[in-house]
Amino acid sequence: MRKPVAAAVFALGLTPALAFAHHGWGSYDAAKKFTIESAVEHVVWQNPHVHVTLKYQDATWEVTLAPVSRMTRRGVEEAMLKPGTVIAAEGYPSTRTEHEMRAERITIAGKVFEMR
Amino acid sequence: MLESLYAYFDSLPALYETFLRTVEFSQLGDLARRSVWLYPAANTLHVLGAAFLVGAILVYDIRILRGREPTKTALTLSIIGLILLLITGPTMFSAEATAIGHNPIFQLKMAIILAALINVLLHWIAGSALPRLARLHAVISGLLWTAALIFGRLIAYF
């Protein structure tokens, strides 16, 4: 009888850590949602995440998007992000790296693409 | 003598940076970033490898704690898991080595794995001649490998 109880207590102890991990995006401040709308400076179409750089308040921000396969599935192709294209990225600032944003969604030519 | 030792330690951080850049700009790193499927495949197989390794190790440890001979199946499964992990881990690492190499959770995970491997080595040397020592190794093993798995998953969130 005692062993299953001990196992259950151990499993419960792990739950907060797992819940935290699941709701993830841990190093981004979800309370500070903001939007950057500017022309794409540079696009890095690669795994584990696609990145674009955008100008925001006189600084260049690195915007982290989704993995390549998810970008494609959601309908975003590399050509749609070519430098000069104006896009809007809505997301959260990194708590770790200055001028880095993780985008929740991006808007290209009036069309919204979810990144999560 | 001491001076050259200091010089050696002073050169280590720069050496580490060079290592990270070399790995990131390697052909493997390039492939892991460019390929649509390689990174997700490595990611998936890394989970499978961890399930095999940590699951089998826990079975092994529990048998030792109960004073039984460990099964060969557990050992074989843990080795298959380890091989999967050693192929897929460096693949993912190479895709963004300079970032991951500075991730505190990744560094912690590597330190835990190093400690766990030293524990394996000590267990091999000591064997099961001393049951109490074998049990201590089993407890340390279970805790360290479980911790390695948890911190591995948390790398993505720090």
Image (cartoon, coloured by chain):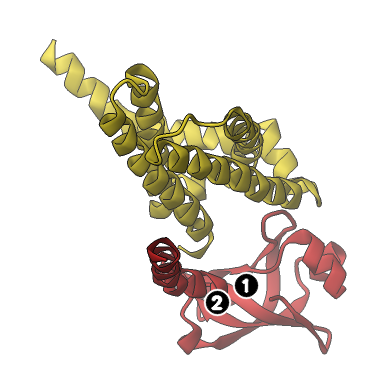
**Which element is circle 1 on?**
strand
For mark 1, name the chain.
Answer: A
For the residue marked with disc 2, what is the amino acid? His
Q: Quadrant of residue A87?
A: bottom right
Q: CA distance from mark 2 to mark 1?
A: 26 Å
Colour for chain B in the figure: yellow
Quarter of the figure that contains the C terminus of chain A: bottom right
How many numbered marks appear?
2
Crowd rating for badge 2 (residues with CA inside 10 Å; few <14, some 14–19, many 20+): few
Colour for chain A in the figure: red
For the residue marked with disc 1, what is the amino acid? Leu
Q: Relative to B105, say whether B86 is above or below.
A: above
Residue A50 location, x and y as percent? Answer: 70, 61
Q: Which residue is mark 1?
A: A54
Which circle's residue, 2 or 1, is located before the other in the chain? Answer: 2
Residue B111 seen by the camera = no
Q: Nearer the viewer, mark 2 or mark 1?
A: 2
Residue A62 location, x and y as percent? Answer: 57, 66
Residue B74 seen by the camera = yes
Q: Residue at 63% of width from left, 77% of height from top? A: A103
Q: Residue at 70% of width from left, 32% of height from top? A: B27
Q: Quadrant of residue A96?
A: bottom left
Residue B106 location, x and y as percent? Answer: 44, 49
For mark 2, name the chain.
Answer: A
Q: Is residue B85 left or right of residue B40?
A: left
Q: Which residue is mark 2?
A: A23
